[in-house]
Amino acid sequence: MSERQLEFRVGMLVVAAVVTGAGLIIRFGDLNSFWERKYAVTVHFEKAPGVTRGTPVRKSGILIGSVKEVTFDDRRGGVDLVIDIREKFPLRKDSEPSLTRSILGDATIEFAPGSSKELLKAGDRLDGLTGEDPVELVTRLSADVQTTLASFEATSTEWRKVGKNVNSLVDTHKEDLDTVIVEAVASLREFTVATRNANQILQDPENKENLKRSLAAMPEMIEETRLTIKNIASAVDSANGALANISDATAPLAKKSSTIVTRLDNVFANLEVLSIELTQFSKGINREDGTLNLLLNDPQLYRSTEQTMSSLTTVLKNLELVMKDLRVFSDKIARHPELIGAGGALKGSSGLK
């Protein structure tokens, strides 16, 4: 084989390798996406760690686009991501984007499927959710683990101290512990004997029957107790109602209590004055030189008073006759006023009205 033929064959092998490589790249590299039509939407995140130009965008795990541009939002704060979505992967209006990061720090924007009938259009804006950063979680977890280990270490130290104290206590009070153990064994034996006696009592047929009757009567007694408590509650309710009625009845008195007390005070003051006057009156009656006392105790004064009353009675009888004459005289004058003159005095009268 000549050198020229060898160079020709090597060249053909290189060409074949290049063509094969290009075909594999086209087949598995999805280069046709460069010629696909896309539409851009803007997603706002409070923070976007690890996101750069070309960060993949997925929906249900399928690659549907990539990040085209990353800018800061000076108006709202945070970050705005301009995302190119392949036209053959339409997104719904309620598709919610979220930013996730792997443990290695690779960022991915994942869209939820959504259920709205309306689709996103080019230029629409969405608000995204930023997930927890695994690195931060691992950092916090490591801090928590260190705190936990420190707590375990402190706890083990305390337990070592407790163990030393217990050992010291056991060594110091070993004889007392032996005594306590002996007493505990004796107590257990006594408890065993008491348990056996209780079993013997319960095994007695008569005691069993009494216990059964007591247990059978227990529900009835509980029901009676419940009824009694219910009656007591009803009585308490009635008492509360009565107290409420008394409170309503005494409320007007309570409002006028000051006036009533003032009037009662005046009444008691008047009664006190009346009592003082009656006392003075009774003292005046009981005096020896008093009029009533003399009238009651002096017989002569009593007789004089009786004679005076008799004389007054006689005078009143005479006055009655005079009054009759005066009525006759006034009647005559009223009927015959001319009798008042001189002619009437000289001329006689028949004496008849």
Image: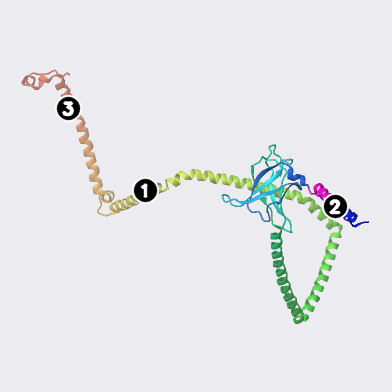
Is residue 16 located in the magenta-colored stretch of the structure? yes
Q: What SS does tag 2 mark?
A: helix
Q: Nearer the viewer, mark 3 or mark 1?
A: 1
Residue in front for this viewpoint, 42 or 318? 42
Q: Are marks 3 and 2 in contact (CB under 8 Å)?
A: no
Kindly identify the amino acid type of the residue bearing the numbered disc 1.
Val
**Can you tell which quarter of the image residue 150 is in?**
bottom right
Kindly identify the amino acid type of the residue bearing the numbered disc 2.
Ala
Q: Are marks 2 and 1 in contact (CB under 8 Å)?
A: no
Q: Are marks 3 and 1 in contact (CB under 8 Å)?
A: no
Report, in whole angstroms, how far the alpha carbon at label 3 lies from the one at label 2. 180 Å
The circle on residue 17 is 2
* Residue where numbered disc 3 is placed: 326
The circle on residue 267 is 1
Q: Position of residue 14 (x, y in %)?
A: 85, 53
User: Mark 3 vs mark 1: which is more N-terminal?
Assistant: 1
User: Mark 3 vs mark 2: which is more N-terminal?
Assistant: 2
Q: Residue at x 37, y 50 (%)?
A: 265
